[in-house]
């Protein structure tokens, strides 16, 4: 270590080979071109340390950080790029997310309202959002949908949703009552 570090507390890429930084950049560019992603030179740039007490500075995906090892550089390169979007913060986004996940509001409501009381109080709403893995500003979304009330109802999501849910329940009950009792199953006795 002492021989490679040249009396410094860490080993730099230049100490291993003076051509290593440019070779790493060229390799990263070649990989990016093969993958069809934007040039790595925009995502990764290298500049040697200006003083011997601080490690070299790498600018990766818009973040500049001083690193001590090439392992840290590689770790930084594999981290996902920060997203420019904030989590959904309104009722409109929540409804769009429900439709994307469940395809119909009827299915979505059935997943949200597990106790089937026809409304979602704030705590029930937050628990439902976490259960279906929806992330966002729950207070703002709840306020948008509840419109000053203490709960969200099916009509808060869509005006015609209560009627469609009622029709769906009636169809489910009709299909249950129309299905014959399986062979060997005991018939309920009259009391």
Image (cartoon, rainbow, N blue to C red):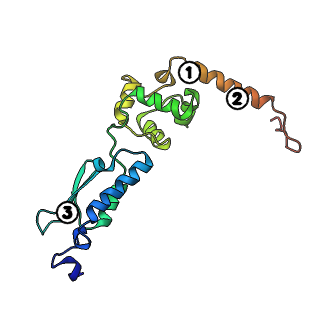
* Residue named by callout 3: 56
Q: Nearer the viewer, residue 131 or 21?
A: 21
Q: Which label is found at residue 162? A: 1
Q: Percent x, y for residue 94?
A: 43, 31
**What is the CA distance from the residue labelled 1 to the residue labelled 2?**
15 Å
Q: Is residue 114 left or right of residue 171?
A: left
Residue 133 in view in this figure? yes
Q: Percent x, y for residue 30?
A: 38, 53
Q: Is residue 161 left or right of residue 69?
A: right
- Residue at the left extreme, as displayed: 51
Classify mark 1: helix, strand or loop: helix
Q: Give above or below for 60 relative to 74.
A: above
Q: Residues within 10 Å of mark 3 (few under 14, many from 20)?
A: some
Quadrant location, the C terminus: top right
**What is the CA distance from the residue labelled 1 to the residue labelled 3?**
63 Å
Task: Give the number of the mark in front: 1 or 3.
Answer: 3
Classify mark 3: helix, strand or loop: loop
Mark 1 and mark 3 lie on one chain; the one further toward the N terminus is: 3
Mark 1 and mark 2 lie on one chain; the one further toward the N terminus is: 1
Q: Percent x, y for residue 87?
A: 36, 37
Q: Give above or below for 12 relative to 81.
A: below
**What is the CA distance from the residue labelled 3 to the residue labelled 2?**
67 Å
Q: Percent x, y for residue 141?
A: 38, 30
Q: Is residue 52 left or right of residue 151?
A: left
Q: Is residue 148 left or right of residue 107?
A: left
Q: Nearer the viewer, residue 45 or 77?
A: 45
Q: Which label is found at residue 172? A: 2
Quadrant location, the N terminus: bottom left
- Contact between labelled residues 2 and 3, with CB atoms less than 8 Å apart: no
């Amino acid at each position: 270590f002492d021989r490679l570090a040249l009396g410094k507390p860490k080993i730099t890429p230049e100490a291993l080979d003076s051509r290593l930084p440019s070779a790493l950049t060229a390799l990263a560019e070649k990989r990016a071109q093969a993958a069809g992603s934007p040039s790595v030179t925009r995502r990764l740039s290298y500049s040697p340390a200006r003083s011997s007490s601080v490690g070299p500075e790498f600018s990766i995906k818009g973040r500049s950080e001083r690193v001590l090892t090439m392992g840290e550089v590689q770790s930084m390169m594999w981290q996902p790029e920060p997203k420019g979007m904030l989590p959904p913060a309104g009722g409109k986004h929540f409804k769009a997310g429900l439709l994307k996940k469940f395809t119909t509001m009827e299915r979505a409501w059935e997943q949200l309202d597990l106790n089937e009381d026809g409304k979602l109080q704030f705590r029930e709403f937050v628990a439902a959002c976490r259960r279906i893995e929806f992330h966002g500003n729950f207070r703002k979304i709840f306020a948008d949908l509840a419109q000053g009330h203490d709960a969200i109802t099916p009509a808060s999501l869509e005006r015609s949703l209560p009627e469609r849910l009622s029709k769906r329940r009636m169809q489910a009950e009709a299909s249950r009552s129309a299905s014959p009792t399986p062979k060997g199953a005991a018939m309920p006795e009259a009391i």
